[in-house]
Amino acid sequence: MLTDKYNRPIKDLRISVTDRCNFRCTYCMPLDEYAWIDRAEILTFEEIERLAAIFINLGAEKIRLTGGEPLLRRNIENLVAKLSVLPGLKDLSMTTNGSSLAEKATALKSAGLSRVNVSIDTLDPEKFKRMSKRGDLNRVLDGVFAAKSAGLNPIKINAVIERGVNDDGILDLVEFARSNGFGLRFIEFMDVGNSNHWQTSNMVSKREILDIIGSRYPIVEHGRRAGTAPSVDFEFLDGGGDVGVIASVTEPFCSSCTRARLTADGKLVTCLFSESGHDLKAMMRAGASDKELSDRIEAVWRSRTDRFSDERLEALQSATGYQPEAHKKIEMIKLGG
Ligand code: SF4
């Protein structure tokens, strides 16, 4: 089995299909200083399909499509149809901002998509517009319900919680998810990219999130699905479903990180906080064979030593502290979540 320096296999592949997004969420989008990827540099569906098959041969079992906003990629359902029939793939999902889901949900389901994660950080329409700079909450909610009607299952809501911004809406999100049968994952605010002004004081920890949830709904811990999921899951004791928290800052999970990422312009990235990637597109367009591409991916993965969130926690707990601006990273809009 292909494993990295810490014995972690490739199990998951996150494919960014575009860096375009119609929202400008402050924790993800660097605004003015960002240069969009040139369209000619974006992988074609055929190129993505070819690389996905190679990753599956190397051990990947799950593929998640991300962006930017993946539904902005024209005819994305055609890519879903190509990927969903790849032999060996066990799970095909998508993370979306939901703004086009109402129009796309049925086509995505028919093409073979299993499930979706939709980012909804608040259920307050005004705050939603402020946080996303331009998002319309009602359109997103229409999308979530369309996904449910189309049979995408499970539907999970992702919410990044930032202190003083949306931490007052945690229980509203819990009630919304419980009453509609949606999964819910809270995410600690992280220093993704280079300009989201992260500091620990802005972050609401897993402990605080659980205390708020537990103040109304008693919960019991389940742990991580398959032992490797980023989220630690909890079950409501009254049978109202479950809720998870992704605690990248306070309880990092690098030791079980089996995720590889492919940027929209064909770079293999081995950590959400990497400075740079490995250019598979250049190889492909220069005529590399599947074997040569596979060998390259294998060599990159075998030398992987990423454990950024572990190192951040160690730095936060040290005398010198942690300076987020000292670490240059690929912008999240290129990598997806
Ligand atoms: S910091 Fe990097 S290595 Fe650690 S869990 Fe996140 S993506 Fe994986």
Image (spheres, rainbow, N blue to C red):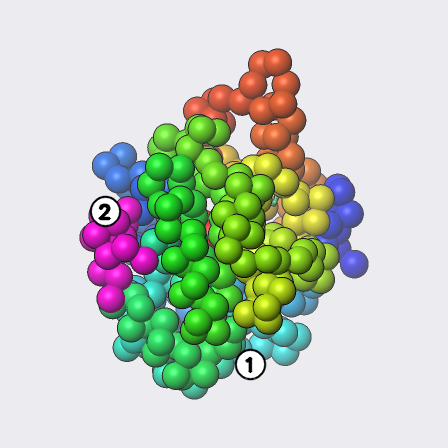
The answer to whether residue 109 is above or below residue 97 is below
Q: Quadrant of the N terminus?
A: bottom right
Residue closest to the eye, 310 or 107 = 310
Horizontal side of 114 relative to 104 (left or right) equals right
Residue on which the image places disc 2: 130
Disc 2 residue type (three-letter):
Arg
* Ligand 1 falls in quadrant: top right
63 relative to 228, above or below: below
Q: Position of residue 225 (x, y in %)?
A: 67, 61
Image side of residue 118 versus residue 206, left or right: left
Residue 112 locus on image (x, y percent): 49, 81
Q: Amino acid at mark 1?
A: Val
Q: Residue at x 59, y 63 (%)?
A: 236
Q: Find out whether residue 135 is within the magenta segment.
A: yes
Q: From where the camera sits, is residue 66 visible?
A: no
Q: Who is closer to the viewer here, 222 or 79?
A: 222
Which SS class for mark 1? loop
Q: Left or right? Give the position of 276 relative to 334.
A: right
Relative to 325, say whether 22 is above or below: below
Q: Residue at x 41, y 59 (%)?
A: 173
In x, y percent, where is residue 262? Answer: 50, 54
What stretch of residues is rendered in magenta? Answer: 123-138
Q: Is residue 269 magenta?
A: no
Q: Which residue is mark 1?
A: 85
Instruction: Answer whether residue 169 is visible to the viewer in this image.
Output: yes
| Image location (x, y in percent) of residue 25 | 31, 47
Residue drawn at point x = 37 percent, y = 46 percent: 168
Query: Chief secondary structure of the magenta span?
Result: helix
Compute the Cα span from label 1 to label 2: 40 Å
